[in-house]
Image (cartoon, helix red, strand yellow):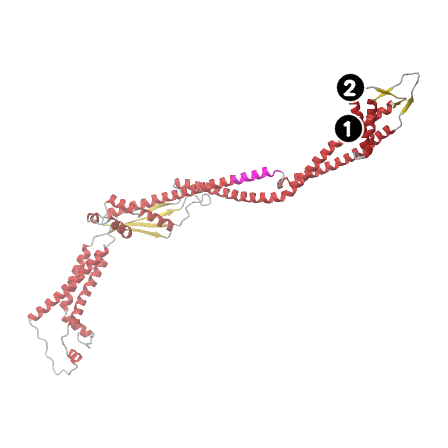
Amino acid sequence: MIPGKQYSFDTLLQVARRRKWLILLPALLAGVIGAAIVAWLPNVYRSETLILVVPQRVPESYVRSTVTARIEDRLQSISQQILSRTRLEQIVTDFNLYAKQRADKELMEDIVERMRTRDIGIDIIKGDAFRVSYQAGDPRTAMRVTERLASLFIDESLRDREVLAEGTSQFLSTQLDEARRQLVLTETKIQDFQRAHNGELPAQMSANLQGQHNAEMALQSLGEDLNRDRERRITLERQVTDLIESPAETKPADPAKPEIAQTLEDELRLAQQALLAVELKLKPEHPDVKKQRRTVDELEKRVAAQKLEGTLTSRPTGAVVTMDPAKRKRLLEARADLENLDRQIQGKLAEEGRLRGLVGMYQARIEATPVREAELAALSRDYETQQQTYSGLLQKKEESQIAANLEKRQIGEQFKILDPARMPERPASPDRPRLYLIALLVAIATGLGAAALAEVFDKSLRTEADVRAALNLMVLATVPVMRDATVSRRGFRRALAASSAALTLLLVGAAIAWRLWR
């Protein structure tokens, strides 16, 4: 290119006329080759099926489904399972897909990856439907593979929902068993606590108060009875004392009658009566009581000794001490009443001790009730929480079981084929009209590029403007170009060589692009 040369529209037209063969030949060859390549491209047929997500036929208010994931998430999960290498290899084997690639010993991993990423299409439509498509060189094969993929989606959806429902039901069963075990364990703890602290429970508070009140009333009544018995005993003691201390009737000895002997036994009996009278008036520690007891002990020993020796005799006395029979009878009755009264007092004292212990027991229970109430409240709180948890799990378990039965009967949410796969009547690719237009544009660009490239490397001076631009000299005269046949043939050969080189580069680039695309 001449430095400083300006190209106007007229100049460009002159270049085009001068290099018309360099434009036409590459353009013509590029167009023919591009058209041949477009015509040679194999037809690719795409078959599609539309799958609708049908909601469960039982209202959610009656049966709540255990599958709550969105269709997008579920579809992604199902797609990962269906588009796994194992499934796709099975489909390739069943329909004999990619026979040429497998014959060329191409890796199955690459074939599966191409099938997964390029030939299979999954598109979600409005959130409640999705489209599954497959493209292949044979229309029937495309339709059959699309049908297989649709059936796999439907079967996998049913299996996935059923497995998820069963898994949820089994999980809830496990949790329910654990909750039942904890509930039974807490019930056992509460029962053991109630048995261990029977009588101190909050529910027995009123019974303890009533029992304490009854025991206190009985204790009060018993105290009054004891007071009356003690007063009566004092009265009986005075009566016995008066009877004993009253003067006895003494009769003088009658000379005409034989003497009445008073034996040691009579003395012992009188000493015992005197001791009883003293004990009724004085305390056991009093000296008179001790003295009289020693006298009774000595007489008892003498009587016992004489009985053993058989020499018990009587001593004569000058007078006989006698007692009025009525007075003696009253004394004996008073002594009997005094003994009975003593036994009654002892029994009532024992009963008083028992009642005091009962009152203390009730008082201890009442005092321990707040502590037991706090402990029982903690156990009951845990029990109520576990019972609520158990009830909630039981309800969820029943609901999950119903949902699992719903899925088994296939009346839950499922996939339904809305538009089945059909045999395509026309290829989905290549788009030949578009490719022909592209080939035409490439051909024109090739011709213009070859001419522009030749013009760039051409440094010849052809016009007066070229001379002024290159040499900056005044032009005095111009001589027109005179061409002969040899020069014209040389220019044609140059144009043909340039066209061939451009087409070669074009073909190499197209081959590389085709290889990468495949």
- Label ID, residue 340: 1
Q: Position of residue 226 (x, y in %)?
A: 77, 34
Real-space Cα distance between discs 2 and 1?
38 Å
Seen from this angle, which residue lies furthest right?
255
Q: Position of residue 34 (x, y in %)?
A: 18, 59
Q: Position of residue 12 (x, y in %)?
A: 18, 72
CB contact under 8 Å: marks 2 and 1? no
Q: Quadrant of residue 224?
A: top right
Q: Which residue is mark 2?
A: 309
Q: From the viewer's side, name the closer residue of 354 and 294.
A: 294
* Crowd rating for badge 2 (residues with CA inside 10 Å; few <14, some 14–19, many 20+): few
Q: On the rendered structure, is 48 left or right of 360?
A: left
Residue type indicated by callout 2:
Glu
Q: From the viewer's side, name the closer residue of 146 and 95.
A: 95
Q: Earlier in the sequence, mark 2 or mark 1?
A: 2
Q: Secondary structure at mark 1?
A: helix
Residues drawn in magenta:
185-198
Residue 340 shown in magenta = no
In the figure, 5 relative to 56: above or below? Answer: below
- Picture quarter with the N terminus: bottom left
